[in-house]
Image (spheres, helix red, strand yellow):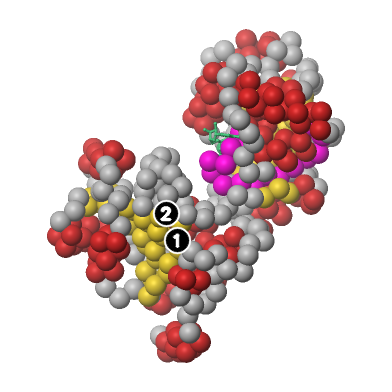
Amino acid sequence: DDGKLDLAREKLRTIFGFESFRGRQAEVVSRILGGQSTLAVMPTGAGKSLTYQLPATMQHGTCIVISPLIALMHDQLRAATANGIRAATLTSADADWRETMDAYRAGELDLLYVAPERASQSRFCDFLTSSPIALFAIDEAHCVSEWGHDFRPDYRQLLPLLERFPDVPRLALTATADQRTRADILTQLGIPQDGLILAGFDRPNIRYTIRHRENPVRQIEALMKEQPGPGIVYAPTRRKVEDIAEKLAAATGRNVLPYHAGLPAEERSANQAEFVASEDMVIVATIAFGMGIDKPDVRFVAHAGIPKSIEAYYQETGRAGRDGDPANAVMFWGAGDFAQARQRVTELPEERRNDERARLDMLDSLVETPGCRRAVLLRHFGEDPEATCGNCDNCLDPPKVSDVTQTARKLLSA
Ligand code: ADP
Ligand code: MG
């Protein structure tokens, strides 16, 4: 109800120091305060943690947070403790188990972070009954789905735990869940179908462009001329990374450095650090680059070949324009990319082939649509976008019907 949400807004200011909720945070918080289990699908950086941390400070009982990475838990613990929230972790890296368990039993914790392998043990389950629980928050909930990109069998064991506390609401959180993953999460964690809140995937300042690859070095060079700021070029192999980096540096005279797992560790981290600090450097990289890198002023992300999937494309292009200023995402593709990717699928274990083919088909539909790119992306993540965005290649310069048939003909003959 409104009274609770008013109190939540007050806590938002006094505890977290934020003036207002972002995106659909308020909806998630008010569902949780009303005891309704929820799946929140929001992109990285949207502020998902707040949607369980805030209710945890308002409710009687502890919020149990299930999170897959110890490092992530300790980051969260530091941040929560800094805000004066009473929080603790129970992981293999902690020495103060007894203290934490006593604090829990005494009802002195707002938040208790645990790893899924712990949470799924029945002894742990017994321990949890020793004090009231306000909420179960399941972070990185896509780990429950085999269709998701990061399946963790321990997440499959969570349902029995949750079912021992049928009256405790559940909040599942993830940034990467397409239709199938979402359905899996709802079933696996026992959340009702109408408990889905999904929003905030649009990155309106990113201009999406997808072009045929002719001479990728020339094409990226042209992009760099247009775009003097920092950029990331993703290339499919180490060899191509080296080759493109060298040629781009020679052609443009700009600082262009490579990044891939085959480089010596010092060179790799030096190149990364230089990129993060630079205002005009371009890094040519394999997909090994980018996770956990926070550089707000990346002005373009280019793909010199197709990414693995629409999710991967969204994540990789999402590294552009985090500061909200205009940025470009440009993919250069060839029909051969899909042929090769499909060939590689035939080498996979049988049980994975259909899923990988489906992923490629979806990526193909993004690449070949004559319509709005953003609309395809957002629909893929379950949103209901406008038919045209005005900020992608196809909206700015709609392909003529003859171009489309020509592309189709080329593909048929390829
Ligand atoms: P996610 O888990 O969705 O990737 P986080 O929970 O880590 O995102 O939050 C990302 C950042 O956004 C954090 O620095 C957090 O403090 C900040 N944040 C969260 N909610 C708000 C808000 N309402 N206003 C301003 N900043 C916020
Ligand atoms: Mg998070």
Q: Decide if residue 353 is on the left or right side of residue 38.
A: left
Q: Is residue 107 above or below residue 52?
A: above
Residue 270 in view here? yes
Tag of residue 207: 1
Residue 164 image position (x, y, % from top left):
81, 32
Decide which of 37, 82 is in the foreground and name it: 82
Q: What amino acid is labelled 2 in the image? A: Pro
Span of residues in magenta: 33-49
Residue 359 in view here? no
Q: Quadrant of ligand 1?
A: top right
Alpha-carbon distance for marks 1 and 2? 8 Å
Q: Is residue 71 magenta?
A: no
**How many dots with numbers?**
2
Name the residue rendered at 41%, 60% in the picture.
329
Which quadrant of the structure image shows residue 83?
Answer: top right
Q: Is residue 197 above or below residue 69?
A: below
Residue 369 image position (x, y, % from top left):
53, 75
Label 2: state its secondary structure: loop
Q: What amino acid is labelled 1 in the image? A: Arg
